[in-house]
Image: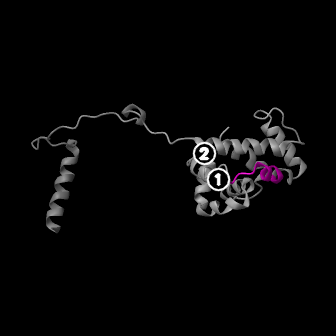
């Protein structure tokens, strides 16, 4: 499971009416020790939104957080402070990923999963293309020179180009 999927599953249950930026920042804040909470101040709200929708990887923030600033017990407390129906909903939503989850251990199970997501992201290396095929670039031939005797545009564009050129010459 990655962070985007984690947010998609937890937000309807834990997010309430907060916007996605606030929710994602709250998730990170809830698993961090006091000593690391200032790390979050260095990120814009739009960055937290990008984390949620997958446009930006959480690898950089994860590296800043991991491991010295993470405390899964804090996140477990965050989960256990929710209402019982929310905890039951989390058990149901995560049963596919956490087969041993139940209302008594829901906080710990989800906290361990979230910590693992952060640690995995912190270990990830940026993908760099190894060849032209990896970046999707097709090689094209660029001619050494182009003949000026041949009009390079469709014939219907020639009158427009002549009109533009004459207008331009008049202005200059």
Q: Residue 148 or 59: which is nearer the viewer?
A: 59
Q: CA distance from mark 2 to mark 1?
A: 8 Å
Q: For the N terminus, give its image quadrant.
A: top right
Quick one: 10 or 68, which is closer to the camera? Answer: 68
Left or right of 89 in this view: 35: left
Neighbour class for label 1 at 10 Å: few (<14), some, many (≥20)? Answer: many
Could you tell me if the residues under marks 2 and 1 are in contact, i.e. CB atoms within 8 Å? yes
The location of residue 49, given as percent across then percent down, is 61, 54
8 or 27, which is in the foreground?
A: 27
* Percent of width and height locating residue 125: 53, 41
Give the residue at x 16% y 58%: 165
Q: Residue at x 69, y 41 (%)?
A: 116
Q: In the rendering, at what x and y percent does residue 51 appear?
A: 61, 50
What residue is pinned by disc 2? 122
Q: Residue at x 41, y 36 (%)?
A: 135
Residue extending farthest to the bottom is 171
Side of 51 relative to 107 (left or right)? left
Give me the residue at 81% from left, 32% from top. 99
* The stretch drawn in magenta includes residue 160: no
| Mark found first going from the N terminus, 2 or 1 | 1
| Residue 72 on the magenta span | yes
Q: Quadrant of the C terminus?
A: bottom left
Residue 124, quarter of picture: top right
Q: Which residues are magenta?
A: 69-78
**Which residue was labeled with disc 1?**
65
Q: Is residue 76 above or below residue 142?
A: below
Mark 2 burial class by Cα count in 10 Å: few <14, some 14-19, many 20+: many
Q: Which mark is residue 147?
A: none
Q: In the rendered image of this protein, does residue 134 appear above or below residue 54?
A: above
């Amino acid at each position: 499971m990655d962070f985007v999927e984690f947010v998609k599953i937890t937000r309807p249950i834990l997010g309430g009416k907060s916007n996605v930026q606030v929710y994602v920042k709250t998730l990170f804040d809830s698993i961090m020790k006091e000593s690391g909470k200032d790390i979050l101040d260095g990120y814009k709200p739009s960055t937290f939104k990008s984390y949620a929708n997958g446009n930006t990887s959480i690898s950089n923030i994860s590296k800043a957080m991991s491991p010295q600033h993470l405390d899964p017990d804090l996140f477990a407390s965050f989960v256990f402070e929710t209402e019982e129906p929310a905890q039951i909903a989390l058990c149901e939503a995560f049963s596919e990923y956490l087969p041993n989850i139940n209302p008594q251990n829901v906080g710990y199970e989800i906290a361990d999963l979230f910590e693992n997501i952060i640690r995995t992201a912190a270990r990830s290396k940026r993908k760099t293309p190894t060849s032209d095929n990896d970046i999707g670039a097709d090689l094209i031939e660029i001619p050494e020179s182009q003949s000026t005797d041949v009009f390079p545009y469709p014939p219907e564009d020639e009158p427009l180009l002549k009109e533009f050129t004459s207008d331009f010459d008049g202005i200059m």
